[in-house]
Image (cartoon, rainbow, N blue to C red):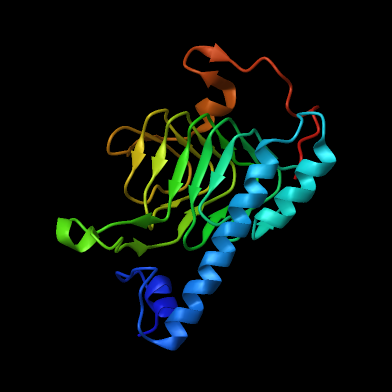
Amino acid sequence: MSLKEEMQSGLLYYEYGHPDAEDQAYEKVLERQRERGKDLTFEYNHTRPSDMDTRNRLLKEILGDVGKMAWLEPPVHFSYGCNTHIGDYFYSNFNFTVVDDVDVFIGHHVMMGPNVTLAATGHPVFGEYRRNGTQFSLPVRIGNDVWIGANVVVLPGVSIGNDVVIGAGSVVTKDIPDHSIAFGVPCKVVRPITDYDRKYYRKGCRVNLDFERIKQPE
């Protein structure tokens, strides 16, 4: 099996030192992608806050896909960038980090607190296997209308559904279903999102805005 196939199948692989010519060629492809992504991200992180035209241009060059009205507070960090796919109306606070050796999919109307990490790549438990950088990669998927709190880590292969809140400081090791509030280490579903949450924005605090009269982005 080729290096590319191992990476895309969730199997163990290493990125350097392959004897096969096809794998050696793919090593160079990966190296070019990583270097380009990091150079562009460095440039993004050093733009002036007022220079939105440059930021928007760079995001389109860094990411595999990016929708309308995406706002990423610098600094941001990507392993590649080209494997991250972001939908419309996305916001991430400072220090958003994506280990995107394989695809990371983020839906529409998603918000990230400070210091969120999405990690599509991990390493084997047995120590000797890690000596040459052996790893495995599994796609991460995040649905629409998701809010991920500060200092959350999402691990390889995890899918987070639509209309989900992940509490601050959580480590998400397993899939989270739609319409859920989840938090903890490891992260677990605490309760569903219900009509109560339509009336109260937090416990005991009634919603004070008329959302029927406020135009919401689609």
Quarter of the figure with residue 210: top right
Task: Using the image, determine if residue 148 lies above or below residue 137.
Answer: above
Where in the figure is residue 197, as x and y percent of width and height? 53, 27
Residue found farthest to the top? 204
- Asked if residue 217 lies left or right of residue 201, the reply is right
Q: Is residue 172 visible?
A: yes
Of the 4 image quadrants, the one containing the N terminus is bottom left
Task: Using the image, determine if residue 155 lies above or below residue 198.
Answer: below
Q: Nearer the viewer, residue 73 or 148?
A: 73
- Asked if residue 142 lies left or right of residue 90, the reply is left
Q: Nearer the viewer, residue 53 or 133?
A: 133
Tally of numbered discs: 0
Where in the figure is residue 178, as x and y percent of width and height? 47, 47
User: Residue at position x 48%, y 36% from top?
Assistant: 116
Quarter of the figure with residue 54: top right
Where in the figure is residue 101, as x and y percent of width and height? 47, 60
User: Residue at position x 55%, y 72% from top?
Assistant: 29
- Asked if residue 216 lies left or right of residue 136, the reply is right
Task: Using the image, determine if residue 72 lies above or below residue 65.
Answer: above
Quarter of the figure with residue 201: top right
Q: Nearer the viewer, residue 128 or 117?
A: 128
Q: Is residue 67 visible?
A: no
Where in the figure is residue 175, as x and y percent of width and height? 37, 51
- Asked if residue 99 lies left or right of residue 105, the reply is left
User: Residue at position x 27%, y 63% from top?
Assistant: 132
Of the 4 image quadrants, the one containing the C terminus is top right
User: Residue at position x 82%, y 34% from top?
Assistant: 51
Task: Using the image, determine if residue 151 lies above or below residue 98.
Answer: above
